[in-house]
């Protein structure tokens, strides 16, 4: 088998999730790929603490709530993996989602990043940007974006 036709070998798949419906589709895809390839699965949730700065005195309360929500998201994703016979490790980090996903993927040695993407309009993309676009542009490894 030549290098061009040789299937990729995944040792670690990183799945980034925010718990949304489209992110759960990405998680299901990551679980399937981990099971099919025998790769380890790391499920990541990024706590967007930057949004909490705008709350002033309520900052810590909001961050605590965001972290609690993230814990529940990771718990559900790990249960999904477990139901499919995939042993997943979970991780939560604070920061900006795009940069955190890229940083963790590189640090952990991920061979593939899987994430869901909302189909925003061009106006929304221009105003708020796209986490999936950032990850595709900056990741050191292949990225699978699930719509």
Image (tube, helix red, strand yellow):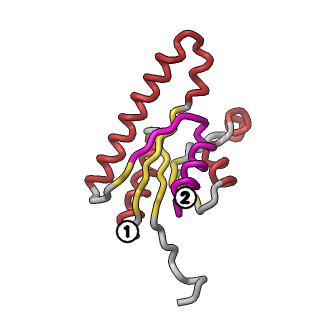
Mark 1 or mark 2: name the one nearer the start of the chain.
Answer: 1
Crowding at label 2, few (<14), some or many (≥20) Cα neighbours within 10 Å? some
The foreground one among 144 and 82 is 82
Q: Which residue is mark 1?
A: 38
Residue at 29% over, 47% down:
79
**Which x, y percent locates residue 48?**
55, 31
Residue at 61% over, 27% down:
50
Q: How far, Cα to Cα, is label 1 from label 2?
A: 17 Å
Mark 1, secondary structure of its residue: loop
On the image, which quarter does residue 142 sit in? Answer: bottom right
Mark 2, secondary structure of its residue: strand
Q: Residue furthest top?
A: 57
Badge nearest the viewer, 1 or 2 = 1
Q: Is residue 77 above or below residue 6?
A: above
Crowding at label 1, few (<14), some or many (≥20) Cα neighbours within 10 Å? some
Q: Mark on residue 144?
A: 2
**Which x, y percent locates residue 98?**
61, 43
Residue at 47% over, 51% down:
15
Q: Is residue 12 magenta?
A: no
């Amino acid at each position: 088998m030549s290098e061009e036709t040789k299937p990729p070998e995944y040792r670690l798949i990183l799945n980034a999730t925010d718990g949304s419906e489209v992110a759960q589709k990405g998680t299901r895809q990551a679980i399937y790929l981990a099971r099919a390839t025998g790769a380890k699965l790391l499920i990541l949730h990024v706590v967007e603490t930057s949004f909490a700065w705008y709350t002033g005195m309520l900052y810590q309360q909001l961050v605590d709530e965001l972290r609690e929500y993230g814990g529940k998201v990771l718990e559900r994703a790990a249960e999904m993996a477990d139901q499919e016979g995939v042993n997943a490790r979970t991780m939560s980090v604070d920061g900006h989602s795009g940069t955190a996903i890229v940083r963790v993927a590189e640090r952990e040695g991920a061979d593939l990043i899987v994430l869901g993407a909302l189909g925003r309009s061009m106006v929304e993309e221009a105003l708020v940007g796209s986490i999936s676009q950032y990850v595709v542009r900056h990741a050191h490894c292949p990225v699978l974006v699930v719509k």
